[in-house]
Image: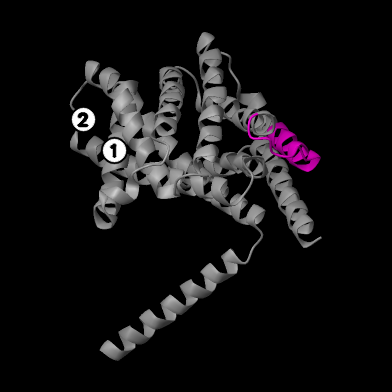
Amino acid sequence: MAVDEEGRGGRARRYAAAAQAHVEGLHPSIRGLLWAAASGLLFVVLNAVMRGLSLALSPFQTQFLRYVFGLLVMLPFVLRSGVGAYLPHRIAGQFLRGGVHTLGLCVWFLAIPHISLADTTALGFTTPIFIMIGAVLVLGERLRWERWVAALIGFAGVLIVVAPKLSGSGGGFLLVMLASSPLFAASFLLTKTLTRFDRTEVIVVWQAITVALLSMPLGLMQWHSPSPWQWVSFVLCGVLGSAGHYCLTRSFTVADISATQSVKFLDLVWAAALGWVMFSDLPSRSTLVGGAVIAGSTLWIARRESRRAAA
């Protein structure tokens, strides 16, 4: 029996090593798209859990505890490697990034209880446009027409999905939610800059530290004791958030930030699938049509990047 278990374990390790070698053999732009797609899936699940928590508790308390548990999830890795391994080379940059991200989260959490998920999703998809503009103006990345076309087609797909569902009942909170998009874009651009100096794990840990510290005053001012299930949900948020930011930061490490933005629009596909699995919400015709447009733009830019690499 022990021999059989060792044999199965050896085969599993060989398969994992072969899969890792295959992925590492892909062009960096393709690997960046894969990491970005994985982060999108994790963030969709995370946002669904956080919205439920923010309706039951204070939005700012939800924000604070989400990053506290994100730090607790990363703590075993820090202790295993030693605190010295997680000291950043640009601590001022880490706090600047944390401050910008905290501001974006405050705006996002302020609006999320007052507008529909469709409106939230639609406005959130403006972030990649701000990121690609910033990548050219701030990071000096090369402006490639394929990336802009893919992002615009993906955004058109989002509008196809959400336009029939926009109610406009959120009033001024729609503008508040929209204001979070350039803030998150600035945070992600700072993350891309920090990848030149620090490892992915270091950036994820310090994001949790800085956002938790900066969110603590508002979180404690509006404190309500969570129920046992809500504590469990915060643990889940910590796992999902840390894993999502790890995948996102990895995508910034291996590829240009503008090259990964078209895959952001796959988040809407993940959201539709999650709604069907968890809540038996069947996708509407507009969701199916828009999803096809989004998937088409993502596959097209992936193929263009692959051909460019082979040329």
Q: Quadrant of residue 263?
A: top right
Q: Quadrant of the C terminus?
A: bottom right
Q: Main secondary structure of the magenta part?
A: helix
Determine if the magenta segment contains residue 141: yes
Judge whether residue 235 can be spotted in this image: yes
Q: Using a 10 Å C-alpha cutoff, classify the residue at mark 2 as few (fewer than 14 neighbours), some (14 to 19) or many (20 or more).
A: some
- Residue 226's tag is 2
- The magenta stretch is 138-157
- Residue 234's tag is 1
* SS under mark 2: loop
Q: Residue 287's x, y, as percent? A: 64, 37
Q: Are marks 2 and 1 in contact (CB under 8 Å)?
A: yes
Q: Nearer the viewer, residue 166 or 174?
A: 174
Q: Nearer the viewer, residue 185 or 153?
A: 185
Q: Answer left or right for 167 relative to 148.
A: left
Q: Using a 10 Å C-alpha cutoff, classify the residue at mark 1 as few (fewer than 14 neighbours), some (14 to 19) or many (20 or more).
A: many
- Against 113, residue 26 (above or below) is below
Q: Residue 10's x, y, as percent? A: 39, 82
Q: What amino acid type should be assigned to the residue bearing mark 1?
A: Phe
Please give the name of the residue rendered at 34% of the width and 31% of the height, measured from the top-left corner: 210
Residue sitting at the far top:
172
Q: Answer left or right for 1 relative to 169.
A: left
Determine if the magenta segment contains residue 264: no
